[in-house]
Amino acid sequence: MAWDFETEPEFQKELDWVDRFVAEEVEPLDYLLPDPYDVRCARRNALVKPLQKIVKERGLWACHLGPELGGQGYGQVKLGLLNEILGRSKFGPIVFGCQAPDSGNSEILAHYGTPEQKERYLRPLLNNDIVSCFSMTEVQGGADPKVFTFSAVEDGGEWVLNGEKWFSSHAHVASFFIVMAVSDPDASEYRRLSAFIVPAETPGIEMVRNMPVGHHGHPAHAYLRFNNVRVPKDHLLGERGGGFVVAQTRLGGGRIHHAMRTIGQVKRAFDMMCERVLSRHTQGTLLADKQMVQEKIADSWIEIEQFRLLVLRTAWKIDKYKDYLAVRKDIAAIKALMPRVFHDVAARALHIHGSLGVTPDMPFAEQVIESFHMGLADGPTEVHKVTVARQVLREYHAATGKFPSRYIPHLREAAVAKYGRLLDEIEAQAA
C-alpha cells in the first residue's frame, strides 16, 4: 500500500535549491521590472536570460514537457510541488519556462502543429525567445463558447477571420495567437469551433484596448478586432470543428499548475499576516494574543492546508489514471475553491495590516482583486461547481420508494427481520 505524504529525497533536494534560487535571484525582479512577458525589453532580458540559463543547466527548464521537447516530463505531483514555489514571484514561471499561456500553447503546437509551424513557433516559444496568446473569450459570451460569433470562413486556400476577442492576455507582446473561431455555425454545439494559428503581424488585426486587472496592474489583456484577417489553410490546428478538443489539451494540467502557484501566493500572504500579528501591539498586548486575530490565523492555515492537499491528491490521480476526464470532478473542484481561499486569506492579511494593508506598499489589495480574476479565468466558479455537482450525482441513484433509503423506521424493521429471532432466543435463555 503506497499512501504517504513524503517527497522523495532526491527531488526534495531540487525543491530546496529552487526555493533558495527563487528567494535570492527571482523574487527581486518583481520590484524592478513591470512585465515578465515583454521579450523585447532589453532590461528584462538582461536580468531574466542569465537566470533562465542557470535553470536550463540545472535541468529544471520546462519540466512539464517531455524530453523530446527539452523538458523533464515530470508528472503532475512533481510539477505541483515545483509550481508552489514558483508562484511566489510573477517572474518565477517565466524563469523556469512554464508560464501560461505559453505552456499550454506549446502543448497544442506539439500535438497539432505541422513540422514547419513547430520550427517557426514552437522552438522559439520553448526557448522563451517569443511569447504567445490564447485568444478565445468574446465580449458577448465570455464563459459560453456556444454563443461565440467570431467567424472563420474558407476562401480558396485560406481562412478569413472576422470578429472581436476580449481579454486576450499578452496579445501586445505575442508573436502569434491561437484563436478559437466559429468555422461551422450549423454544426452541433461542440463542433462549431476550430482553432487557428494567427501570426501577430497578419494584416487586419486591430488592438482596440489593452487593459490591466484593477487600477495598478500592468496592461496585459487586450480587446482585439479582426478585420478580414487571412491565414493559410494549414494554420488550422487539429480537425475542422475540433476546437474544443484542441483547447482541452491545455486546460487540465494547466489548472493544477495554476492552483499550486496560487498556493505559493497565498502562503506568502499568510506568512506576512503571521509576522504582523507578532510585531504589532494594541490595547496593551500583541495582536497575536487577540482571540479574533487567532481565529483568522487558524482559519487561514486550515483552508490553505485543505486546499493544498486537494490539489496534490488531484495531481496524484492524474498521474495514476493518465486521463483528465477521469479526474474532471477533482480538477473542477480545485478551480472552484482556488479563488475563495486566495480571497479570504489575502483579505484577512489586508485587514490585519490596517491602513497599510490597503496601500500599494503591500500586495494585499492587488491579491484580493486577482482572486476575483481567478474566479473568472478558464470559466467562472459557478461553471466548475456545476461540473462538480453533476459528476458527484452520477455516483448516486434515486430512492425507489416513497421514503428515503435511510428512512429509520424501515431500517429498524429490516434490522428486526435480520436479528430479531436471535435476540428473542438470547432473551429466552436469559429468562
Image (cartoon, rainbow, N blue to C red):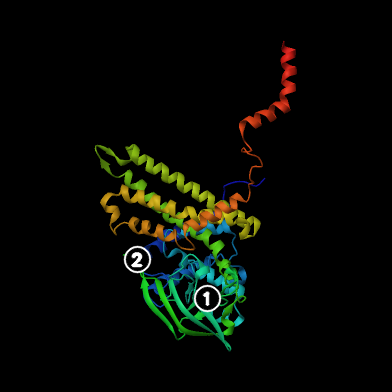
Q: How many marks?
A: 2
Kind of residue indicated by mark 1? Ala
The quadrant of the rendering that contains the C terminus is top right
Q: Is residue 14 visible?
A: no
Residue nearest the observer in this picture, 414 or 97:
414
Residue found at the very far top of the displayed protein: 431
Picture quadrant where residue 185 is located? bottom right
Measuring from the top left, give residue 115's x and y in whole percent.
Answer: 61, 81
Identify the residue at horizontal 52%, vertical 57% (top origin). Answer: 384
Is the residue 119 above or below the residue 214 in the image? below
Residue tagged by mark 2?
A: 217
Identify the residue at horizontal 42%, vertical 76% (top origin). Answer: 224
Which numbered marker is on residue 181?
A: 1
Which numbered marker is on residue 97?
A: none
Measuring from the top left, give residue 134's x and y in whole percent.
Answer: 49, 72
Measuring from the top left, give residue 301's x and y in whole percent.
Answer: 44, 45
Identify the residue at horizontal 50%, vertical 56% (top origin). Answer: 335
Residue nearest the observer in this picture, 406 or 241:
406
How far is mark 1 from mark 2, CA to CA?
A: 29 Å
Q: In terms of sequence position, does the residue under pointer 1 or pointer 2 come before the other?
A: 1
Picture quadrant where residue 296 is located? top left
Would you call the spot at circle 2 few (<14 residues within 10 Å), some (14-19), or many (20 or more)? few
Cβ–Cβ below 8 Å for labels 1 and 2?
Answer: no
SS class of the residue under badge 1?
A: strand
